[in-house]
Amino acid sequence: MSRYSILFFVFFSQLIITSSYTLVGRKGHTASYMDNKIYFLGGAIENYFETNDFFYLDVSKPFNLDSTLPIVDLSNDARKIHPHSSSGVSTICGPNNDTIFLICGVSKDSFFYRFINNKEWVPVISFDNVQWSSALEYFLLPDLNIPNYLAPAILLPDGRIAYIGKRIDDLWVNFRNIYIYDTINGTWINMSTSGIEPSSRALHTAVLTQDDLIIIYGGVDSQFLPVPDQISVLDTKVDSFTWSVPNIDPVPSSAPFRDHTATIVGNYMIIAFGEYRNTTNDIFSDQIHMIDVSEKNNYMWVKSFTPNNTYTSNTTTESTSTIEPASATKSANATKSPGEGLAAIIGGTTGGIATVIIIISVSYLLYRRKRTVIYAPQAKHAINC
């Protein structure tokens, strides 16, 4: 019975709740990595129309940028969220790291929401007339005498919070000085970095790798043109922190340079949406790009994603499986009577039919909930690695 059930399940699971979907170009959205998913929220699309679109990229399985992307649309669950772009920051919080906390500033008002346990968005108390550059500053700035206009924050593994640069002229960031807050003893350090300092920029991203390197990517100069040094790395394992430029092929022409998001998943930096330049025009990207950062100082633009635990999981499964000796299998088959064989066929068929009915019922319920699994094709014109 189980053999027929498994066959029917595999077959129909490829058919249910699947529909074609094309990602639209957007900028100014947020990205939150939780439970092997990158959740994307909001952003401006064509004609700068602000949205509360909500969907995630499933990074628990391999995928290829030239093929299809496993995307799950949750927009129906985000109808309470105020449409926004370039005015929100999000972070993962909660005792089990199972909550997305969104701070969304719109005009003079701020909106706060929590997405709890993958179930629902819940509005929380709001504060007026507050500007946010990172979610961490919400807990620090009211009580501490530190410079205004710090750059976005990175939480280091030892519990310290590093602000990667200081804003000049309210927007552009200078990276020579790094402000560090020690959350254990409540003290501040102003560290002067060494190495090849990145050029001042705005609208870039900063992420922390598994080996404690901070990568900044993208950004614009004071003329709002792409900065020439698109990628720089800050080593936080040395004192003082040291900047360097990794070896990497030129940035693909379709890769964004501003208003994108960057998320570290294992050995990959996943860069999503934002704006890229086509000759002299800035275009909203509907693409996802990836950089393999597994080898220090030697990075690569790649199209294939493989989760870190893929091979480990397979190896574990294979090593713990039990293979019956051929003689035992032959002996067992020999003792089966014709009646038992017929009963097995009838039972398998019945189980298969029951499985089909269950799958169809579940599919209908999921369809009614409008949580659609969408395999989103990448636009062919935008891949140019």
Image: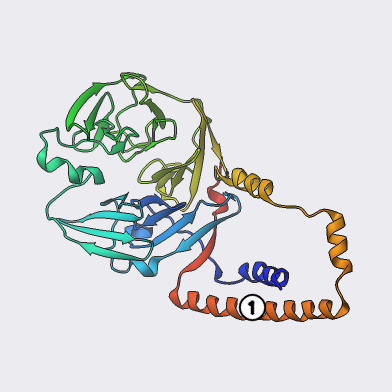
x 44%, y 44%: residue: 271
Residue 14 lies, with reference to residue 270, above or below; the image says below
x 28%, y 54%: residue: 101
x 32%, y 69%: residue: 79
| Quadrant housing residue 326 | bottom right
x 33%, y 57%: residue: 48
Residue 143 horizontal/vertical position (percent): 10, 40
Give the colour scheme of this rendering: rainbow
| Quadrant housing residue 343 | bottom right
Residue 48 lies, with reference to residue 145, above or below; the image says below
Residue 345 horizontal/vertical position (percent): 79, 78
Residue 156 horizontal/vertical position (percent): 33, 34
Check disc 1 and report its element: helix, strand or loop. Answer: helix
- Note whether residue 272 is visible: yes
Q: Is residue 162 left or right of residue 10?
A: left
Q: Is residue 269 left or right of residue 350?
A: left
Pick the quarter of the image with the N terminus: bottom right
101 or 348: nearer the eye? 348
Q: Is residue 225 left or right of residue 364?
A: left
Dot 1 amino acid type: Val
- Note whether residue 50 is visible: no
63 or 37: nearer the eye? 37
| Quadrant housing residue 20 | bottom right
Q: In this figure, which residue is indicated by the disc labeled 1?
A: 356
363 or 323: nearer the eye? 323
Give the total of numbered labels.
1
Residue 128 horizontal/vertical position (percent): 12, 55
Pick the quarter of the image with the C terminus: top right
The crowd level at tag 1 (other Cα within 10 Å; few <14, some 14-19, many 20+) is some
Residue 244 lies, with reference to residue 74, above or below; the image says above
